[in-house]
Image: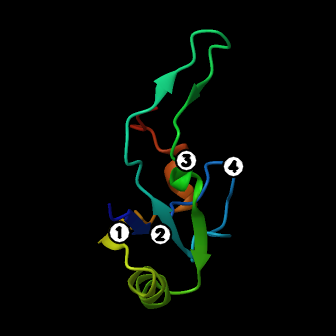
């Protein structure tokens, strides 16, 4: 059975004001089987440990090359585009401002 991996560029954390660690590309393995609940302990788990795989790469090309070298099926997610609406400081005090 072949492992399917997802390569994506993570969004910045809500706790960050800058773009900190969001420039790296992440390679994660997709789960091969659904998770199951342990009735005794209440934990969620599965017998396959490949879903714990998370590797970081500086570029998408390096991540894809690594996956191809290992014979994994690759699924690349394009990064979401960032839309910025330019504002002026005066908009904070506008009369018709909607909260």
N-term mark: 4 or 1: 4
Secondary element type, mark 2: loop
Tell me: 55 left or right of 35: right
Q: Nearer the viewer, mark 2 or mark 3?
A: 2
Disc assigned to residue 9: 2
Secondary element type, mark 1: loop
From the viewer's side, name the closer residue of 19 and 43: 43
N-term mark: 1 or 2: 2
The percent position of residue 73, horizontal first and vertical second, equals: 31, 71
Figure quadrant of residue 45: top right
The residue beneath circle 1 is 81
- For marks 2 and 4, give the CA distance: 17 Å
* Residue at (58, 63) in percent of width and height: 54
Q: Is residue 83 something that shows in the picture?
A: no
Q: Is residue 41 above or below residue 54?
A: above
- For marks 4 and 3, give the CA distance: 23 Å
N-term mark: 2 or 3: 2
How dense is the environment of label 1, judged by Cα within 10 Å: few (below 14), some, or many (20 and up)?
A: few
From the viewer's side, name the closer residue of 17 and 47: 47
The residue beneath circle 4 is 15
The percent position of residue 66, horizontal first and vertical second, equals: 48, 85
The residue beneath circle 3 is 92
How dense is the environment of label 2, judged by Cα within 10 Å: few (below 14), some, or many (20 and up)?
A: many
Tell me: 47 left or right of 7: right
Q: Do residues under tags 2 and 3 come within 8 Å of each other at their CB atoms?
A: no
Q: Do residues under tags 4 and 3 come within 8 Å of each other at their CB atoms?
A: no
- For marks 1 and 3, give the CA distance: 26 Å
């Amino acid at each position: 059975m072949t492992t399917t991996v997802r390569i994506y560029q993570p969004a910045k954390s809500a706790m960050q004001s800058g773009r900190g660690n969001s420039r790296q590309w992440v390679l994660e393995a997709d789960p091969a089987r659904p998770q199951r609940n342990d009735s005794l302990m209440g934990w969620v788990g599965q017998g396959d440990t490949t879903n714990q795989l998370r590797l970081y790469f500086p570029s998408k090309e390096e991540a894809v090359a690594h996956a191809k070298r290992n014979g994994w099926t690759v699924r690349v997610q394009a990064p979401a585009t960032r839309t910025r609406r330019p504002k002026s400081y005066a908009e904070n005090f506008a009369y018709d401002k909607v909260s």
